[in-house]
Image: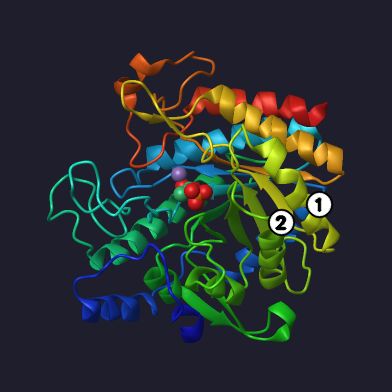
């Protein structure tokens, strides 16, 4: 693992005190994990069905969780929204839905620019620095990794309590995920577990069940892909519109060397204008490689725009259209449109345009509370699931 992590790593903070980082890592290497290796294996088995075309994957939650919003109410709202979306998708498609939250650990964010509009170092998620617009808040603080662990563990406790009451049966199982971005944290949360995965001990990143590598950190020579290669967890890789079919096959060969359905999810985030052009050659070449991956559509990140009044937003219709294009591509090629990856919340926020409330730009300031990207609110999320259910049925 040290060798993998010695490769160049994009999007890491410049910690002011490397000694303090080593101290925090030493603590995290000994804490109780947030999830168990048995649960990770159970998710892999469920994802194998998604890869083979007999189940559907729904993954969603905040773009960036914050410590302040790690509350029972907020977690219950997101979990309930995802379960309702899953129920719609399940009844329309006739396939069981595997539900995975972007929560209990989604605290690190990659950024396009090192400084923000006011010239301050950019906010990189609550696990790194503070969102407040002051120079002090923006200094990376390694103790935040300890707070991220505590908040993840408490969010996971809320998730477990919600499910223990039977409130969500029969679609009761719920798994967690986040972007494996901050390598000091992810490596420290990894545990070598004996006796699984081909009988050899293997590292499991027990900060979540499912980890993905983002669009900005998927460099083939970089540390993130090399780290993901070593893990026993199911892994996702975001692929944007500049991804070539050859690059996609290279990810598949490295991250799924034994062709294990459920191991790798390719999360396409092409934008509604590009998906029908860019995705087909990628799907064809990966299918021809003989590997069975999960094809998942992230209809959010390729459709981000700035509204005329200055808000980062997405239009519901563009989100829906990217999903429609994704399903069409797979229908034509005979592959399984296996899942959705969305930024959603149970709260009645005003961050994305359109949808059932017909939100327009002047509505955005009313309840625009995201710490990073705009999320579909509860009504938009439920409507999206109903409409996607219709494409999957037809
Ligand atoms: C995200 O999922 O919030 C994200 C940053 O996505 P991407 O890596 O696809 O840009
Ligand atoms: Mn995002």
Check disc 1: other Cα within 10 Å, few if <14, some if 14-19, many if 20+. some
Task: Please indicate whether residue 184 sits to the left or right of residue 258 in the image.
Answer: left
Q: Examine the rendered structure and indicate whether residue 174 appears above or below residue 277.
A: below
Query: Which of the pair 259/309 is nearer the observer?
Result: 309
Residue 195 % position (x, y): 67, 84
Query: Which of the pair 135/370 is nearer the observer?
Result: 135
What residue would you read off at disc 1?
284
The answer to whether residue 159 of the structure is visible from this angle is no
Q: Examine the rendered structure and indicate whether residue 251 appears above or below residue 72.
A: below
Task: Please indicate whether residue 60 sits to the left or right of residue 259 in the image.
Answer: left
Is label 1 in a helix, a strand or a loop?
helix
Q: Quadrant of residue 290?
A: bottom right
Residue 12 % position (x, y): 35, 66
Q: Is mark 1 within 8 Å of ligand 1?
A: no
**Which residue sits at x=39%, y=79%?**
30
What residue would you read off at disc 2?
245
Is label 2 in a helix, a strand or a loop?
helix
Residue 64 % position (x, y): 39, 47
Q: Quadrant of the C terminus?
A: top right
Check disc 2: other Cα within 10 Å, few if <14, some if 14-19, many if 20+. some
Q: Examine the rendered structure and indicate whether residue 268 appears above or below residue 220.
A: above
Distance in Å between CA atoms under marks 1 and 2: 8 Å
Residue 238 % position (x, y): 58, 53
The answer to whether residue 28 of the structure is visible from this angle is yes
**Which residue sits at x=38%, y=54%?**
107
CB contact under 8 Å: marks 1 and 2: yes
Q: How is the image coloured?
A: rainbow
**Which residue sits at x=41%, y=75%?**
188
**Which residue sits at x=68%, y=59%?**
248
């Amino acid at each position: 693992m040290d060798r993998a992590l010695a490769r160049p790593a994009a999007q890491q903070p410049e910690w002011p005190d490397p000694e303090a980082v080593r101290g925090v890592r030493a603590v995290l290497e000994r804490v109780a994990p947030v999830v168990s290796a048995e649960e990770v294996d159970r998710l892999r088995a469920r994802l194998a069905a998604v890869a083979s075309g007999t189940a559907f994957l729904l993954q969603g939650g905040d773009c960036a969780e914050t410590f302040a919003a790690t509350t029972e109410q907020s977690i219950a709202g997101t979990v309930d929204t995802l379960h309702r979306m899953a129920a719609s998708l399940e009844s329309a498609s006739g396939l069981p839905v595997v539900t995975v939250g972007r929560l209990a650990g989604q605290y690190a964010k990659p950024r396009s620019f090192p400084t923000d509009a006011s010239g301050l170092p950019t906010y990189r998620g609550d696990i790194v620095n503070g969102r407040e617009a002051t120079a002090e808040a923006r200094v990376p603080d390694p103790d935040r990794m300890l707070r991220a662990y505590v908040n993840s563990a408490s969010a996971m406790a809320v998730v477990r309590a919600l499910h223990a009451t039977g409130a969500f049966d029969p679609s009761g199982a719920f798994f967690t995920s986040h972007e494996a971005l901050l390598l000091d944290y992810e490596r420290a949360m990894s545990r070598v577990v004996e006796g699984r995965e081909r009988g050899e001990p293997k590292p499991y990143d027990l900060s979540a069940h499912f980890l993905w590598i983002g669009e900005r950190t998927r460099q083939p020579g970089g540390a993130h892909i090399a780290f993901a290669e070593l893990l026993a967890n199911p892994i996702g890789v975001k692929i944007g519109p500049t991804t070539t079919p050859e690059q996609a096959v290279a990810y598949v060969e490295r991250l799924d060397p034994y062709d294990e359905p459920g191991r790798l999810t390719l999360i396409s985030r092409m934008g509604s204008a590009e998906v029908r052009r860019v995705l087909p050659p990628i799907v064809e070449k990966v299918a021809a490689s003989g590997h069975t991956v999960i094809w998942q559509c992230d209809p959010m990140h390729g459709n981000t725009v700035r509204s005329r009044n200055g808000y980062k937003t997405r239009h519901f219709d563009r989100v829906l259209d990217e999903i429609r294009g994704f399903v069409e591509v797979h229908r034509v090629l005979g592959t399984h449109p296996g899942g959705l990856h969305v930024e959603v919340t149970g709260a009645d926020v005003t961050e994305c345009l359109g949808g059932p409330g017909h939100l327009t730009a002047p509505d955005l300031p009313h309840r625009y509370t995201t710490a990073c990207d705009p999320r579909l609110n509860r009504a938009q999320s439920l409507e999206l699931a109903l409409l996607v259910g219709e494409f999957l049925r037809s």
